[in-house]
Image (cartoon, grey):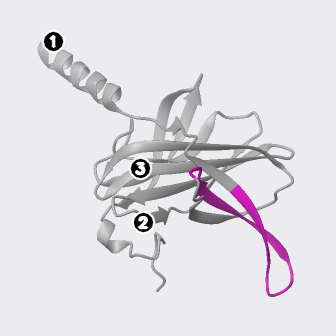
Amino acid sequence: MKNILLIIAVIFTAQLSFSQDFEPSNKYILALENALSENEDVSIKALLQTTNDAEENLSFFPLVSGENINEVVISTLENPVLNGVQRVIKVDVKYIEYCTYTISNYILETTKGDFISLPMLTNEDCNDEPSQLVYLFPSQAFGKENQIITSQIMVEANTVKAATQEDSFIWNDDSYGASGQLYEEL
């Protein structure tokens, strides 16, 4: 019985040691662009660009307001162990108002050079609970094979203490189409 527990402990420790996390990246920048809608309302969109000389636009997403942005953090997860995906780019835009709000944008970079945006996640920090809504990928702790999991995680001292699954996407790169959208319109 002790041998079985020892084997389980070794396997669990090995799984955690092979898990990856997002690392800060300086390969990308976020550019803000004002756009005028049909109603002549000004909206702001963020353009994710490469930092090379070509400044290629990779993806874009709307911003709530450019005035209250406190910080932008761009990080990457290399080899998330999803078929056809070589990297995940995570863009956290932090707003300061009464509380701190973080809008997280996850962009999958495929092995074909396409970019797929996942639905945005919003987290509010009013100094109450140390939890975050995140996407977990197979290469990460609490990740599952061939799935992108939406999970509420509890964080203490920059360490994930627990994860509660909220939703999951079974990954099949053929079902997402070339439009870069996670869901196809019905």
Q: Residue at x 57, y 30 (%)?
A: 155
Tell me if residue 109 comes above or below residue 10 in the rendering: below
Crowd band around label 1 with a 10 angstrom C-alpha radius: few (<14), some (14–19), many (20+): few
Viewer-closest of 36 and 19:
36
Residue type, mark 2 in image: Asp
Does the magenta portion include 44? yes
The residue wearing badge 1 is: 2
Residue matched to label 2: 114
Q: Which element type, helix, strand or loop, lies under badge 3?
A: strand
- Looking at the rendered structure, the kind of residue marked 3 is Arg
Give the residue displayed 40% in from the left and 34% down from the top. 20
Q: Please indicate whether residue 32 sits to the left or right of residue 21 in the image.
A: right
| Amino acid of disc 1 | Lys
94 is higher (above) or lower (below) than 43: above
* Mark-to-mark CA distance, 1 and 3: 40 Å
Dot 1: element:
helix
